[in-house]
Image (spheres, rainbow, N blue to C red):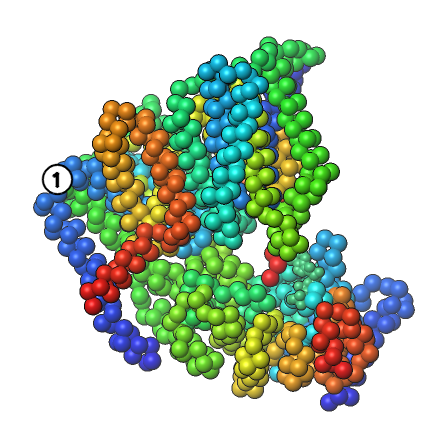
Amino acid sequence: MIGASLGAAAYERAPEISRILAGAGPVEDTRRARLSAKADAILTLSGIGISFGGVTALSDVDLEVKSGEIRAVIGPNGAGKSSLINIISGLYHANHGTIAIDGQPFARVPANRLARLGVARTFQNLALFGGLSVRDNIASGRVHTRHTSFVEHIAGLPRARREDAVIAEKTDQIVVFLHLEAVADRLVATLPYGLQKRVELARALVAEPKILLLDEPMAGMTATEKAEMAGFVRAARDRHGVTIILIEHDIGVVMGLSDRVAVLDYGRKIADGTPAEVRADPAVIRAYIGTAEGEASDELL
Amino acid sequence: MAVQALDAERLPIDWQKLALPAVLIAVAYGLIPTYASSYLVEAILLPFLALSLAAVGLNLLTGYCGQLSLGSSAFMAVGAFAAYNFNLRVEALPLVATMILAGISAAGIGILFGLPSLRLRGFYLAVSTLAAQFFVQWALTKFGWFSNDNPSGVISAPHLTVAGFSLDGPTGRYLLSVTMVIVLTGLVWRLVNSAIGRNFIAVRDNETAARVIGVPVLRTKLLAFAISSFIIGVAGVLWAFTYLRTVEPAGFNLDRSFQILFIIIIGGLASIRGAFLGAAFIVVFPLVLSRLGAFAFGGLFDSGVLDMSQRIVLGALIIIFLIAEPNGLSALFDRLKRRIGSRSS
Amino acid sequence: MNYYDFLFAIEVLVGGLLSGVMYSLVAIGFVLIYKTSGVLNFAQGSMVLFAALTFVSLVERGVPFALSLLVTLAVMVALGFTIERTVLRPLVNRSPMTLFMATLGLSYIIEGAAQLIWGTQVHGLDLGIDDTPFEVGGILISSFDLLAAAIAAAMVAGLSAFFYSTRIGLTFRAVADDQFAALAVGLRLPRIWGTVWTTAGFVALVAGLLWGARLGVQFSLSLIVLKALPVLVLGGFDSILGAIVGGLIIGASEKLAEVYLGPFVGGGIEGWFAYALALVVLLVRPSGLFGQKTVERV
Ligand SMILES: Nc1ncnc2c1ncn2[C@@H]1O[C@H](COP(=O)(O)OP(=O)(O)OP(=O)(O)O)[C@@H](O)[C@H]1O
Ligand SMILES: [Mg+2]
């Protein structure tokens, strides 16, 4: 396993190295070929770069995610982690590179079709619908499966009612799965922060996505809440086989939860491998020492 | 299955919820037509009903879907003038059909001016709705066709008949108005409590998240513009045909648009009941103010002073409500009800 | 097109540009407040009315010109601070839409109060500026408009100097850039907002005097807010340069359209033409010509 992923990493770097040697631009063709060659990669980013004004948030980042794995992305503040997830979900448009979701390549992922592509996400800063109840927030995660018009809803026609019933049932299942029964009918804005984070996870899970993007799902939580959340994330993968990309600052959580870890620093990927490999990587240690993440580097060592 | 069981559980609560509307309907069709004076009907109830409906329509767009519009009265004008022309130019068109066609015309214009919402957000959109306000008012004044070549663009209400009954008297106009308002409000109530209504709220509360989970944001916004304009258009017909009887384009000016916006701020954004409470307030408040003013200041309180103090009080109320009770009269009403409830139990 | 038609077109253009400067004058007041507090201040128009009405009423009551100016300025400063205290501070952290609606309410209060205090009649305002047009190369130019433009230009230069070379200006820009960061480093937002509203009050006074001298001081003066909005949309709510260029573009194209397009559609298009123009531009550039194009952070 370790050998395989190491090999993969080396293989991934090869074109980059040859490109640097040749002093040429991105070699898109070979990348494409490589994409299709990897059958078990459900998500592949190649040569992703984006900048805002003068700030380069990401440059030439490659990332490959296998079906069913929990793939962590870590890095100091401002490393570009959220930008990466925003590019995958089509909210930011990369200046360079391509994204392949389930074999389908995009230069820009269409955000409005994201759910139908089988991708769901949570946001670093809560992005719930404050004016809706917990249950309605969760149910909204299945809105992409609706086909009925407003007339059918106003008239209460059977098709609309059936659709509502199916969604309500899925919603109930998720409510039970994430232990949200007690608050299901409350207005979501009245919930404590930790529970709101959980509702956001629920809204993403109810869509039954193939790929789940989690941007710091445990930020600002107590240790117990974190453990609970980690349990939910693992259970979501184990029970539903969903592929997960996880951004998280708590190194302990990351090391315990993920199959592979990519490390970003100043918009570049500086390491990629199993938790054990990444922990031993000198570049990672260097990146973390002397940053605000001091305690994290302690943990790493 | 689980869902139906839930519904059964909720049923008794639903009855309680239906009690108030039932009483209101009994009052609307029983008490008022029999006992209300024609002054009450003509000066208070008819404007109240038309403004309530317009506020329900604006609330759909601004309160529920979060798209601030400053051009509501343009859509009232489109409704009124469209109804006038359908009635004039289509032989023997039933009144209800006229109203629906007028609503559809307003919806069409609403979609047209809602199109910028696909690219614009916030203030940029609000300013673009002003374009509707000025353009419509100009077009209705400039092109004589709209008012059948009346030199000042004035239109007069036709005879109102439904199924052979003449509704030209105050009671008839009241019944027509109240029926339209009840039916349309009922439909809007169903809409906002449906999945579509929740899409509106999702777009309002977090457009980005809504897009990512698959809410068709553009379609949802246009739908909000269309339905809202339809309702406001019909409200315009009621305003022109049942309340004023003769109107000119200048009657649907920016001040009227602001008035409708103020109704939903004072009544409560995203609340259907709020639209009615706000409209009642806006209609009754100038009357109360003028009585109070005359009582306190006598002859000093002339119409100019009344007008100015009305502006000041209204503006102050808007700010006070925004600061102290952002959910408006509707929330105040709830609190009052709870207090009475807790006292009686 | 013969020579005289050409001259006439130029004359229309110049007239339009000059009145565009007057639009910019109002728009700048908006930009100041929008940049530093994120509020689209609909009450800017009524502040213009209030300033002009106060000034002209004082002058009519025999107060000397300079003293009237000073008193009016003091009144506007007081008004700015009161607004900050009673309206903005309680609404801090609320949505921009809420703040906008509050300023809508504010405009009703200010308009009502201005007329309740000073009456509703129309006042003439004579600034002692000669308004005989003079001729340059066959083109008639209004000297009043020219002077107004010069005053506006001086004010813009003054504001820019203030923004870019003083310490207060620096803090203003810091706040405009990032309110939270500004708070974090200990800038005192309320005081800054108070100052900004005062500045906006001053801008309103200048605009009120010039517009009042042109149109007479009356209720409709507050409606110039409706002229400034398309300028803002065109230029971007957060750009002073945008307000100026937007004003020029709208002033010029409005006059040209009125003269060359108006006759075909029955005239009177100045009510909406600016909005239509601004909308077309917006559809191409959703944050205006000079507005910051930002990617929403998520
Ligand atoms: N929408 C945006 N507009 C401008 N700059 C942005 C935007 N989004 C991100 N950036 C910048 O890009 C860089 C990377 O930001 P990003 O949010 O991706 O970092 P991050 O790794 O998620 O950090 P954190 O751990 O703090 O969440 C930062 O310098 C940030 O300021
Ligand atoms: Mg982040």
Q: Is residue C119 above or below residue A135?
A: above
Q: Is residue B109 above or below residue A53?
A: above
Residue at image mark 1: B37
Q: Residues within 10 Å of mark 1 (few under 14, many from 20)?
A: few
Q: Residue at x 36, y 74 (%)?
A: A165
Residue B279 position in % (x across, y down): 29, 45
A158 or B317: which is nearer to us?
Answer: B317
Quarter of the displayed picture in which ligand 2 can be seen: bottom right
- Residue B287, picture quadrant: top left
Q: Chain of mark 1?
A: B
- Residue A107, picture quadrant: bottom right
Q: Residue furthest right?
A: A21
Q: Residue at x 43, y 67 (%)?
A: A190
Residue A200 position in % (x across, y down): 51, 71
Q: Amino acid at mark 1?
A: Ser
Q: Is residue A129 above or below residue C174?
A: below
